[in-house]
Amino acid sequence: MTERSTNLQSDRATDFEAEVNYDGEQLDLADRISLRRVAGMSTELTDITEVEYRQLQLERVVLVSVWTSGSQVDADNSLAELKLLSETAGSEVLEGLVQRRDRPDPATYIGSGKVAELREVVVATGADTVICDGELAPAQLRKLEDKVKVKVIDRTALILDIFAQHAKSAEGKAQVELAQLQYLKQRLRGWGGNLSRQAGGRTSGGAGIGGRGPGETKLETDRRRINTRIARLRAELREMDSTRETKRAERRRNKIPSVALVGYTNAGKSSLLNRLTGAGVLVEDALFATLDPTTRRTQTADSRDFTLTDTVGFVRHLPHDLVEAFRSTLEESVLADLLVHVVDGSDPDPQGQIEAVREVLREIGADQVPEQLVINKADRADPATLTVLRHQFPDALVVSARTGAGIEELQSRIDERLPRPGVEVQALVPYERGDLINRIHHEGEFDKLEHTAQGTLVVARVHEGLAAELSSFLLSEGADTLVR
Ligand SMILES: Nc1nc2c(ncn2[C@@H]2O[C@H](COP(=O)(O)OP(=O)(O)OP(=O)(O)O)[C@@H](O)[C@H]2O)c(=O)[nH]1
Ligand SMILES: [Mg+2]
């Protein structure tokens, strides 16, 4: 990975030749492409043996990226991230190649000279997969695959695969499958051409990709079946969303303020949730460890309740299909009273992460929600980077979920920025209504609390609902003196 392919060319040339001979023409291309069913299709649609999905057996991979803009450092960071993503998907990264171009080659993504070099690297390293850092058109994937003679996938497919591996809840699984099917549907013709058994594949010299006659019909059938499945998944997701909506509505009724932890994948959102609430949420040094939002009820220092939700992490160029599919999950953030935007301060490009996250927030319509920036991993971040970040984002807080540094400050900042209950009340609450005092404790804010012979005398700010319940115990203006 650190070594650029250009260094490899000379000393591996002989291996390359041997491999080429061994490899022959394209005869075993079909063998290298293994297939799998789309997850979940087997139960309901047992008859769809044709709808097969290229298995991402990403075992030994070579990464390829086209560097169109930005600095060398940006290009390296981007490739480093692709490496992390690939490893998260369970593969071993053998080599990384970057090509500087104005724009990706329309035919093969990388230029033709680089394609030959890539083929050499693939042969020399014994890679079985090439992963391109971008979203490639189906025709580009196919052409490149023809040339390098191993499986070629793009960043989108890689991210979809990671999500598929990590999804745990029924909702998460349905969302991932929906996104995969959307992706597959657009590529069905292209991939069908490469994979299609009934059409005889390329080697038969037939009409090829999505050819005429029965082949075409087959693709159409597949597409229709995929559409049916998509529709069913959408309906299921709507159903699940209504359950979530019921919970949300209940929180709204109780006026419990909500905070959502958002941020780049691996920034430390789950670690912060654990720090702030003691919840035992999965923390992993892996991308997209969290796919299901976890909501915990917790309290501010003055025991006001609020909810804290851990959310799915974002990444640069998050596939649009995924954002669409995860919309209901992501909506947790749109409806929050405050976003705690967690940034990994030890990342080589925190600013880039912040920008990528804000872009997704805009896409889902959460850019209107107040945002508190939190620079995490202060314990291992470079002090110079932290200085720059503090300067650039003066309102940001610098914390470490690991050591606990800055956490108290974060707690009081959350407290400050949570919406305040709007109605000021003065009431004399009889002792048998201790439940109301308790609710003010959790849902409102006391200014004064005094135990008198007649009951508990309170001056507090509460939400309208609670104010209404307190209405029979309210004191008139004149009674103000009582509390002084
Ligand atoms: N050194 C250090 N490591 C941290 C800190 N906070 C989190 N980590 C580590 O960073 C990794 C990712 O943490 P998570 O809390 O899982 O991150 P996340 O944002 O929830 O990640 P995803 O759910 O995958 O998007 C884990 O290995 C944590 O132990 C910190 O303050 N300092
Ligand atoms: Mg997480």
Image (cartoon, rainbow, N blue to C red):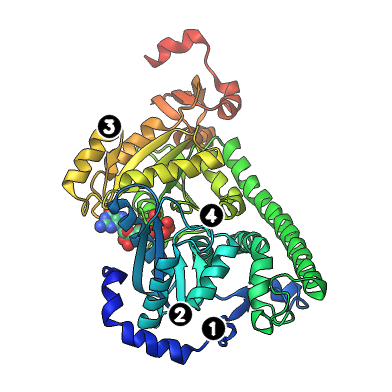
Q: Is residue 83 above or below residue 328?
A: below
Residue 475 pos. (x, y %): 52, 15
N-terminal of the two: label 2 or label 1?
1
N-terminal of the two: label 2 or label 4?
2
Front residue of 122/332: it is: 122
Q: Nearer the viewer, mark 4 or mark 1?
A: 1
- The quarter of the picture where residue 231 lies is bottom right
Cα–Cα gap, marks 2 and 3: 48 Å
- Which numbered circle lies on residue 394? 3
Residue 401 pos. (x, y %): 29, 52
Residue under numbered circle 1? 32
Furthest-left residue in view?
A: 383
Q: Are marks 2 and 4 in contact (CB under 8 Å)?
A: no
Q: Amino acid at mark 3?
A: Pro
Q: Secondary structure at mark 4?
A: loop
Q: Is residue 267 above or below residue 449?
A: below
Residue under numbered circle 2? 128
Q: Nearer the viewer, mark 1 or mark 3?
A: 1
Is ligand 1 closer than 8 angstroms to the Cβ of mark 4? no
**Residue at (35, 51) in percent of width and height:** 272
Q: Amino acid at mark 1?
A: Arg
Quadrant location of the N terminus in the rendered image: bottom left
Q: Nearer the viewer, mark 3 or mark 4?
A: 4
Front residue of 353/34: it is: 34
Furthest-top residue in view?
A: 478
From the viewer's perspective, is 244 left or right of 292?
right
N-terminal of the two: label 3 or label 4?
4
**Residue at (72, 60) in percent of width and height:** 230
Q: Are marks 3 and 4 in contact (CB under 8 Å)?
A: no
